Image (cartoon, grey):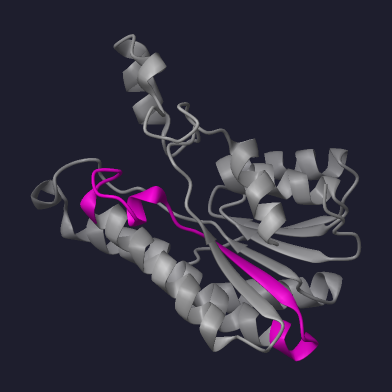
């Protein structure tokens, strides 16, 4: 496992799933954690897990589609722990699993706001802080849905394609600063967001088919993804 002793890691969407498991893995590697989510109950479980791993943690209830709240999150890292080494912009929403013409406009807007603006603001506010120190890593959660057709609903897929583009262009913009930007593109992974898919498969006795499009021929789990996040960080 990589050593993150004396490093400060900020994670959004840390109240469940990939974000929560990543917080635990970073904690086990010695990092101090700033965990953000709108799910306050989930954040308390993250606090318990991180504390049991012996790491320090601060929590922030934040909507990452709001620039002021993302800026405040970065400021929290600096005030609570004196720095920011890793920002894992993981918060996201799936939106309705339905044809685009059946989506309410407000639902489409929410997917775009959270899935695109959240990572954009993470780069905008975390990037310069890291650059002044000459080092840092930003990891964004995209999806295979941003690469391949028929891997997710239209709006969700479009938003994740935007995250992939953001990672490429932000990495170029920050080249030479010591700040790296990467995106992870999970396939079907069992989390709270994908629970309806897994519940539907269980109801129809088709769980054996889940994840068959993944190269591993199985659905992913949060530890699979968290380990990749630590590697990129």
| In the depicted structure, whether residue 194 falls above or below residue 171 | above
Is 126 magenta? The answer is: no
Q: Looking at this view, is 54 or 220 the one in front?
A: 220
Instruction: State the residue lying farthest toward the front.
Output: 215
Q: Position of residue 219 (x, y in %)?
A: 47, 29
Quadrant in which the C terminus appears: bottom right
The answer to which image quadrant residue 116 occupies is bottom left
In front: 227, or 59?
A: 227
| Whole-percent x, y for residue 101 in the image | 8, 51
Residues in magenta, as a range: 130-154
Q: Position of residue 55 (x, y in %)?
A: 87, 50
Image coordinates of residue 194 in percent, x first then y, are 41, 35
Residue at coordinates 55% horizontally, 77% vertically from top-left?
123
Q: Choose top left, top right, bottom left or bottom right for residue 214.
A: top left
Within the image, what quadrant is residue 232 found in? bottom right
8 up-or-down from 207: above or below: below
Viewer-nearest residue: 107 or 156: 156
Please tell me whether residue 138 belongs to the stretch shown in magenta.
yes
The structure residue drawn at horizontal position 76% and vertical position 45%, both measured from the top left corner, is 25
| Whether residue 68 can be seen here | no
At horizontal 61% and vertical 39% (from top left) the residue drawn is 224
Horizontal side, residue 115 vs residue 170: left or right: left
Q: Residue 26 vs residue 171: left or right?
A: right
**Residue 16 falls left or right of residue 86:** left
| In this view, 63 is above or below 79 | above
């Amino acid at each position: 496992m990589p050593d993150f002793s004396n490093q400060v890691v900020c994670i959004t969407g840390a109240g469940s799933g990939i974000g929560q498991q990543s917080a635990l893995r970073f904690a086990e590697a010695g990092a101090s954690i700033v965990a953000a989510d709108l799910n306050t109950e989930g954040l308390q479980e993250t606090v318990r897990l991180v504390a049991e791993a012996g790491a320090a943690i601060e929590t922030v209830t934040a909507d990452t589609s709001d620039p002021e709240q993302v800026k405040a999150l970065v400021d929290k890292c600096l005030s609570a722990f004196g720095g920011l080494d890793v920002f894992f912009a993981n918060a996201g929403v799936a939106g309705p699993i339905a044809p685009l013409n059946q989506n309410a406009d407000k639902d489409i807007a929410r997917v775009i706001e959270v899935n695109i603006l959240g990572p954009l603001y993470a780069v905008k506010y975390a990037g310069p802080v890291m650059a002044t120190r000459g080092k840092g890593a930003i990891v964004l959660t995209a999806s295979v849905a941003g690469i391949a057709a028929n891997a997710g609903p239209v709006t969700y897929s479009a938003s994740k394609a935007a995250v992939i583009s953001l990672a490429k262009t932000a990495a170029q913009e920050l080249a030479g600063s010591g700040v790296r930007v990467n995106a992870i593109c999970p396939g079907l992974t069992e989390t709270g967001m994908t629970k309806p898919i897994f519940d539907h498969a269980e109801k129809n006795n088709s769980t054996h088919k889940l994840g068959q499009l993944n190269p591993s021929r199985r659905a992913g789990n949060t530890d699979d993804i968290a380990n990749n996040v630590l590697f990129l960080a």
